[in-house]
Image: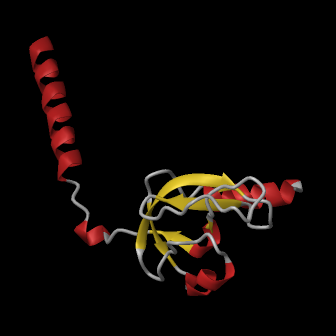
Amino acid sequence: MSDEQQHDQHVRVWRYWLGQKIVCIEDFSRWEHIICCVKEIPILNAVYTVREFVELYHPTGVGLLLCELYNPPCTCLDDECEITFEIEYFRPVVEDESKTDIGFAQKILRQRTTRKSRKINEDA
């Protein structure tokens, strides 16, 4: 793999982490008839959780295993591993910022501010 390809692969992966919620943007229904070992496939627009990253030996470079889907090891492959799904077919779930609750952070900030105020008053 060239340096440029490795860089592109790292750029694609940096947006993802284990346990992250992602949404499927590909219709995988065609896979049911292509690969004999795929029992569970991602559904277009469904949300999944990243279980594991797997290095792939084709241009995309990275495959995903998903917490919600488990397939048996594929006997069609030399190393008999679980079939992965290409990272390009998923995007991170974007939370609606208007619904994001930052109350926990505000509470921590208030506690820290109160402690600093007391310390300053005690020194005076």
Q: Residue at x 21, y 59 (%)?
A: 101
| Quadrant in which the N terminus appears | bottom right
Residue 124 appearing in the image: no
Q: Could you say which is closer to the camera, residue 117 or residue 26?
A: 26
Towards the viewer: 75 or 82: 75
Q: Quadrant of residue 87?
A: bottom right
122 relative to 65, above or below: above
Q: Quadrant of the C terminus?
A: top left
* Residue with the most extreme top position: 123
Q: Is residue 62 left or right of residue 92?
A: right
Give the percent coordinates (x, y) of residue 98.
Answer: 26, 71
Q: Quick check: 10 left or right of 96?
A: right
Q: Could you tell whether 46 is left or right of 31 in the image?
A: left
Residue 67 on image: x %, y %: 44, 58
Q: Residue 37: horizontal and vertical position, in percent?
A: 62, 69
Residue at the right extreme, as displayed: 2
Task: Give me the residue at 41% from left, 77% from top.
Answer: 46
Q: Quadrant of residue 74?
A: bottom right
Q: Is residue 90 above or below residue 115?
A: below
